[in-house]
Amino acid sequence: MPDRRVSHRARPGAGHSKVPEVTAWFWTVKVLTTGMGETASDFLARTLGPVPAGCLGLGGLTVLLLLQFRSTRYRPWTYWSAIVMVSVFGTMAADVVHVIAGVPYTVSAVAFSLALAAVLTLWYASERTLSIHSIRTTRREFFYWATVLATFALGTAAGDLTAGTFHLGYLPSGLLFAAVIALPVLCRRFLGLNAVAAFWAAYVLTRPLGASFADWMGVPTGRGGLGWGTGPVSLALLVPIAALVGYLHVSRADTPAEDRPAGQTG
């Protein structure tokens, strides 16, 4: 008689990857979303107030993550929309800790680092892997999005720490992180750093990289920026994000290999 028991992780489409292939497209859209999340969060907080903006961000994040979890495979619009909202809400979370609770960025950066380490430790203890290529079960997807949220909050605190607390300013901070983000690649190539560790290190660094440049464009000249405004900068970043995700939806250039049409290699 066949065994009809169902694993606690099983669900329809469990064999399909829920995240994109890691290509140049992935990193390009990721950096753009980090910048947009920074300026969009600031714009909403100034327009609506921190609490209403936070409620709106949490609501949007909840809806889009529910859609992502309900999807049976990677879908560019669903996935990247969720990433945008994680970026917006992650910024709000880091800012609330500093602005409303009065926690210094030195403390929040350490706290978010510990939170990220805790999530990764629990993920590995549970699944024995941290590879994003393994996101094919509900439990792993929960760990993945918890990790992503922690990286955005940590990256926001780190960017504000260098730009504000250390008085580097937004443009120098962006240039600093542009240099530092090369380290995981170099360590992977020349020192044999594990591919998964290199990926997550670079993933964390994309946040302060994109956010620093976005802040530089958006904040007033008196604060060391170009003074273009957080609203216009958010819109200017949203346009290429939407264009690139539209391209990925049509071309399937970052779709996992098993879900591509026969003969398509990416």
Image: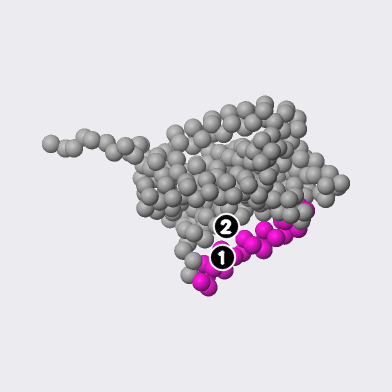
Q: Is residue 20 visible?
A: no
Q: Looking at the picture, how far across and down is residue 94, in whole percent?
A: 64, 41
Q: Residues within 10 Å of mark 1 (few under 14, many from 20)?
A: some
Residue position marked by numbered label 2 in the rendering: 202
Q: Which residue is mark 1?
A: 185
Q: Secondary structure at mark 1?
A: helix
74, above or below 128, in the image: above
Tell me, yes or no, whether the highlighted magenta stretch contains residue 181.
yes
* Residue 196 x/y as whole percent: 47, 58
Q: Can residue 86 be seen by looking at this rendering?
A: yes
- Residue range in magenta is 169-191
Q: Is residue 223 left or right of residue 201?
A: right
Position of the N terminus, as image quadrant, is top left
**C-alpha separation, residue under disc 2 versus residue under disc 1:** 8 Å
* Quadrant of the image occupied by residue 174: bottom right
Count how many numbered circles sit on residues in the image. Answer: 2
The answer to whether mark 2 and mark 1 are in CB contact below 8 A is yes
Residue 77: x %, y % from top left: 55, 40
Residue type (three-letter) at the residue carrying disc 2 = Ala
Q: Residue furthest bottom?
A: 190
Q: Residue at x 44, y 54 (%)?
A: 131
Front-most of 71 and 251? 71
Residue 205: quarter of image: bottom right
Residue at (47% x, 46% y) in the render: 119
Task: Name the N-terminal-most of marks 2 and 1.
Answer: 1
* 192 vs 117, nearest the viewer: 117
**Residue at 62% across / 32% down in the picture?**
57
